[in-house]
Image: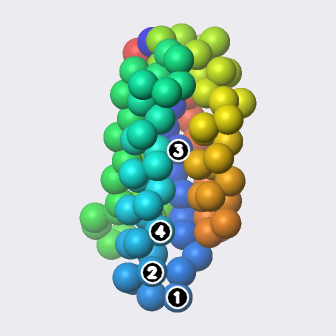
Amino acid sequence: MIRHIVMFDVDADTAEDRNAKITEAAVRLEKLVGVVPGLRSMTVGANSVDIDGNFDFALVADFDDADALAVYATHPAHVEVSTFIGTFKTRRAAIDFEI
């Protein structure tokens, strides 16, 4: 199994705007489970400890294997969500590892 972790920073004028964008991203991302083959789980959470340098939100997704992660990367439903997040993300970091 592959664990995929991605962290994002959000461009927002207010905390309310940032939270609304994160909430919408979370809803859209978590709906991918059952749509993208090989995606076993998806958890999305906003940063809850205000430490300088922390990202605004992150996702943790588990995939059957590296091939399933590759399918996810180009799946139209994921591309749609990724495009949405791209409208407000300012920074992204990711890591994938076997569990």
Query: Which residue is at 33% across, 72% downward?
Result: 50
Q: Amino acid at mark 3?
A: Val
Percent x, y of residue 79: 67, 42
Q: How is the image coloured?
A: rainbow
Q: Nearer the viewer, mark 3 or mark 4?
A: 4
Marks 4, 1: nearer the viewer: 4
Residue denoted by label 3: 6
Asked whether the beta carbons under mark 4 and mark 2 sit within 8 Å of each other, the answer is yes
Mark 3 and mark 4 lie on one chain; the one further toward the N terminus is 3
Cα distance between the residues tagged 2 and 3: 21 Å
Q: Residues within 10 Å of mark 4 (few under 14, many from 20)?
A: some
Residue that mark 4 sits on = 21
Contact, mark 1 vs mark 2 (Cβ under 8 Å): yes
Reading the image, the residue beneath label 2 is 17
Does dot 3 land on a helix, a strand or a loop? strand
Which percent across, then down, holds residue 84?
A: 62, 58
Tell me the amino acid under the disc marked 1: Asp
Q: Which disc number belongs to residue 82? A: none
Residue 73 appears at what percent x and percent y? 67, 31
Q: CA distance from mark 3 to mark 4?
A: 16 Å
Residue 74 appears in which quarter of the rendering? top right
Q: Nearer the viewer, residue 52 or 97?
A: 97
Distance CA(mark 4)–CA(mark 1): 11 Å
Spatial CA distance of label 4 from label 2 is 6 Å
- Crowding near the residue tagged with mark 2, few <14, some 14–19, many ≥20 C-alpha atoms within 10 Å: few
Q: Secondary structure at mark 1?
A: loop
